Amino acid sequence: MTMTPTAKRNSALGTMARSNTAVGLFFMLPAAVFLICFLTYPLGLGVWLGFTDAKIGRDGVFIGIENYQALANDSVFWMAVYNTVLYTFIASILKFVLGLWLAMILNEHLPFKSFFRAIILLPWVVPTVLSALAFWWIYDAQFSIISWSLMQLGWIDGPINFLGDPNNARASVIAANVWRGIPFVAISLLAGLQTIPQSLHEAASLDGATGWQRFRFITLPMLTPIIAVVMTFSVLFTFTDFQLIYVLTKGGPVNATHLMATLSFQRGIPGGQLGEGAAIAVAMIPFLLASILFSFFGLQRRKWQQGGQD
Amino acid sequence: MASVEFADVRKSFGTHPVIKGVDIKIEDGEFVILVGPSGCGKSTLLRMLAGLENISAGEIKIGGQVVNGLAPKERDIAMVFQNYALYPHMTVADNMAFSLTLKRASKAEIEKRVKPAAEILGLTPLLDRFPRQLSGGQRQRVAMGRAIVRDPQVFLFDEPLSNLDAKLRVAMRAEIKELHQRLKTTTVYVTHDQIEAMTMADKIVVMHDGLVEQIGAPLELYDQPANLFVASFIGSPAMNMIKGKLDPNSALKFKTDNGVELPVAKAPESAKGRALIYGLRPEHMTIADGGIPAEVVVIEPTGSETQMIMRVGGDLVTGVFHQRINAKPGETVGLSIHAEATYLFDAETGKRLV
């Protein structure tokens, strides 16, 4: 019996088909193409643009770290960094505290529990631009419902200048961001709370724990792994926030609410300085990496979660 | 240590009553087992004693003090849960010391209490492990250790052995019993396994459908069941129950609905003419030539004894024999029934007449 060339080719293909590595790579191809086209390429292009003096309609030439040197002496850029860190820090803490509180309330046996759990998601479901527009009216200098209510109650004499004063504006955009971000935190933490067996709370209360001690010694430690995940995502979302600021204040007044994302866009697209915009965007990377590293260590399985060796 | 008393205790979930008036007195130092089928309310009763469920009506007393309004932590009781409820993020030592940590006890005090408890239960080499690293039996022991460290007035056990395999269950049964003999703390133990109840308890409370059917020492319940439910629940294999009536011509004969005559030791006047149920424990019969003819259906030799399911007139009867039997399915053997050990129950009310 002799082997025909066709049979040989077939067997070569067969060998490849039987190789798990080759098949694995083949099946990864669609995902890889997608990631390379839509994530790796834009990221690489952004980093490259940061080292050029590209403008809209004109290819840039490589200018080294000139853009970054310019940013280092740019007070508006440092203002944006300060704003972003402040915005992320305060909004994340508020989202965590209020979200955890809401999750604990929703975890109790309330009437219409599933109804409340559903409506709590609303701020998360509404498109950001839509809710930002609503907040824009709420914070309006003349027609603000908050100012109007407080004036009706006689607590203030004139309307509050929500978005016109730097500190008011910062507080206002943070409040809007918190309102939008709470559902994500609350629902995720609620899911975490529900994985804690009721019998642990019962055992603790028999052991003599008060409500606060049950929270401190049972709920909180058992929730830490999910808190690490949720807060990492929450910090990433907040740090890269753009839509809310862009609709509410466009970075004003006098750059008081400019975040790195909004400044990058403004310099890069309306301002036409693509290179400088890209450099600002790239400057966000260290912060985001730090946050991811934090989550990486925070997410590592605690000793008590690991199985036994015996 | 303390006595425990339930006085006309009731509990409803919404309009649905689950405990329908329960009276139980538990003496100081007693080991009492609440036993009954799933859904009979035994766990609910235990949780009411622990303070984890509200009491709809009636009174629960611990050491003479009414505890209806007291929070779980004020009742000074320790409970071992079915799933052990160990704190997964704490080591064995921390789990056992948790109640002391909450009281801000000193390190020396904690050590003084945890060490002997760990010693008793053989947990000393495991004190630094986390619950996940323990086997089922070890977790069970940690749960008991956590209870012992508390030195409470009452121990509560909620089906503590149901998550263990059969062999370990037998071992833990002996361990819990020995522990009680050593500590002499009043113990209330819930199980659906009548063998657990029979082997461990000083006193068994048989519950059914939110009510107490009978309270008594294990052998008391076995020998003198108050009614059909207790008779069928206690004992394994279960008591044979055969429907029929007393023979109107001869008071000491029971005639089954299928026409077979079975012996009776005594028959009260009240039993005559009524629909009855004839109760016969599997071990109260022997194989004898010239006995009641029984067709062998299944024969199960276990070595020390032989279990046989037979057809007597149309009724299936289970027998346990201490001799080896060479019968084959389909053959007929002669059954000799120990008339002294038989029972008669009223078929309508279920009450035992003899």
Image (cartoon, coloured by chain):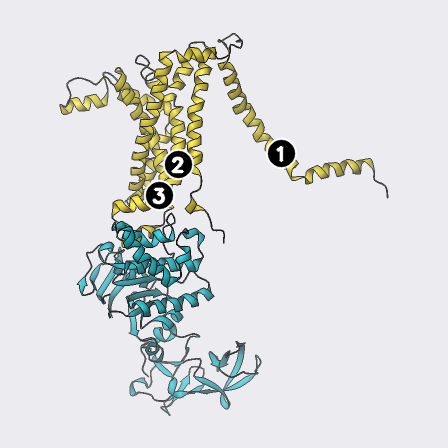
Chain colours: A yellow, B cyan
Chain letter behind tag 3? A
Assign a secondary structure to mark 1: helix
Chain letter behind tag 2? A
Assign a secondary structure to mark 2: helix
Between disc 3 and disc 1, the foreground one is 3
Asked if badges 3 and 2 are on one and the same chain, I answer: yes
What is the spatial separation of the Cα atoms under label 3 and label 2, in whole angstroms?
Answer: 11 Å
Q: Position of residue B287 (x, y in %)?
A: 50, 86
Residue at 38% across / 50% down in the picture? B91
The residue wearing badge 2 is: A228
Chain letter behind tag 1? A
Residue at 41% across / 32% down in the picture? A294
The residue wearing badge 3 is: A221
Q: Residues within 10 Å of mark 3 (few under 14, many from 20)?
A: some
Residue A25 - label = 1
User: Which three-letter amino acid code belongs to the residue tagged 3?
Assistant: Pro
Between disc 1 and disc 2, the foreground one is 2
What is the spatial separation of the Cα atoms under label 3 and label 1, in whole angstroms?
Answer: 41 Å
The picture quadrant where one finds residue A277 is top left
